[in-house]
Amino acid sequence: MSEAAATKSAAKALLLFTLPLIMSGLFQQIFNWVDAFIVGNVEGELALAGIGATTSLYNLFVTVITGFTSGLAVLSAQLFGRREKDRIRKVLSTYAILMGAAFLLIAAAGILCAENILHRMKTPEHIFGSAESYLRIILVGIPFLAVYNTYSAVLRGIGNSRVPFIAVLISSGVNVVLDLLFVAGLGYGAAGAAIATVLAQAAMTVYVILYTCRRYPLLRFRLGKEALNLKTIRQGVHFGAPPAIQSGISSVGSVFLQQFMNGFGEQTVAAITTAYRIDTVIFLPIINFGSGIATMVAQNIGAGDRKRAGQMFRSGLILMTVISLALTMLVLALGGHLIAMFGLTEASVAIGVRFFRAIAGFYVVYGLSMAVRGFLEGNGDMFFSGAAGILALLVRIAGSYALKPVFDNMVVAYAEAFSWIFLLAILVLRYWRFCRR
């Protein structure tokens, strides 16, 4: 097979694997979109700002889960490439139990401390009540997300990205129906949106567990001593801890940045948190292509085919560039209309539009950095990837404070863009040194 044909084949395989990941992530974000859309239009801007004020804290838990399980996906992919299927079952059993139990305790602590945490984040008084009720309820769903993401990671590792998408699709439909019932119908406000999301997350988790048990008998396990494996715990920590720590520290940084942003007032909080909600969906193709590159590279590394792994990476770079540029044009054209959908005032929409104009030109930088990171993680270089993310966060935080006099409330956008440039630079340097070994 010629090099061009091999690259085309790799691109096709990457697309087929990654498209369900993108769709899964898209519908998962619909949880937050539907909550915000219905609450913003039914209850008003203050209730919407209340949900937005909890976003960075809630994401602290979610990103730790997704960070750790992204490492489990790479581990499962390498084991799958080496045809060590029994060890994949041990990964699933060990971490479904550990992740579920750990985040049950973490969620309970968060619920108990919600009021104190929101005070420390300097949440504005007018939105404090809705923020507190939303946060206490939404944290109930964290253990479900932990178990779901563990199953999803193992399924992705063995090449099945379709079922996690179907699970999210089902739960998104449940979430929409329940949001309409609890918020628009019964008038429960932000609390009703949180209840709807938790019930939908539970449905998603139950579906993926039942499917896995039915479709993959080898992945079935029973609770007991055999369900936990010390060697697997060590392996999982090696692959999962660096991205989880990086994700956790990044989210802690986002909590500080949320506090920093709260100082600009309720209107800026509503505008930029809504813009970030849209941005999160816009980033999904970029993030999931990065995950797709990591998984496909890991499978080929596990199988001992480094040439094919390199073809996956090169194909990913091309696709990532095209996607990033397309998303830039999309958000510049439609960003203002998307923000307005959430019931914000005209002045708040104008702030959101300015945010998009400031940051959208840097999407391609972020996309390329995710592609390079995916290649490094697929090769098992998790520690450097995590460390690079932490350093980029420090650049973002320092830039936010240092450049505030220059950019005012748009400093949030520019500081993040500068951190992406820094991240790409150090990842490319690592890739260059990695390839010279």
Image (cartoon, rainbow, N blue to C red):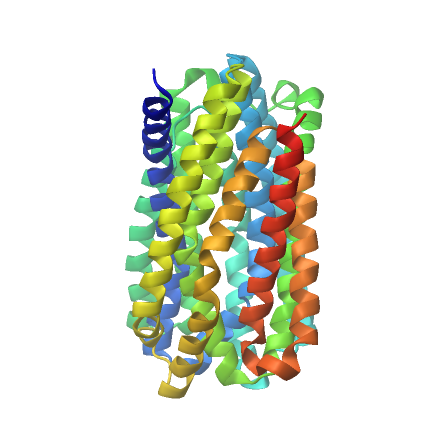
In this view, 127 is above or below 356: below
Instruction: Confirm whether residue 216 shows in the render.
Output: yes
Q: How many marks?
A: 0
Q: In percent of the image, x 32 and y 30: which residue is there?
A: 12
Left or right: residue 436 versus residue 157 is right
Looking at the image, which is closer to me, 119 or 279?
A: 279
Tell me, yes or no, if residue 200 can be seen here: no
Splitting the image into 4 quarters, where does residue 22 fall? Answer: top left
**Point 49% across, 25% down: residue:** 309
In the rendered structure, the answer to whether residue 345 lies left or right of residue 307 reads left
The picture places residue 381, in percent across and down from the top left corner, at: 65, 33
Whole-percent x and y of residue 418?
60, 63
Q: Residue at x 54, y 40 (%)?
A: 372
- Provide residue 252's location: percent of width, then percent of height: 67, 60
Q: Is residue 339 depicted above or below 27 in this figure?
A: below
Residue in the image at 32% along x and 62% along y: 330
Q: Name the foreground residue: 232 vs 26.
A: 26
216 relative to 59 in the view: left or right: left
Residue nearest the observer in this picture, 245 or 382: 382
The quadrant in which the C terminus is found is top right
Q: Quadrant of the N terminus?
A: top left
The percent position of residue 379, horizontal first and vertical second, equals: 59, 28
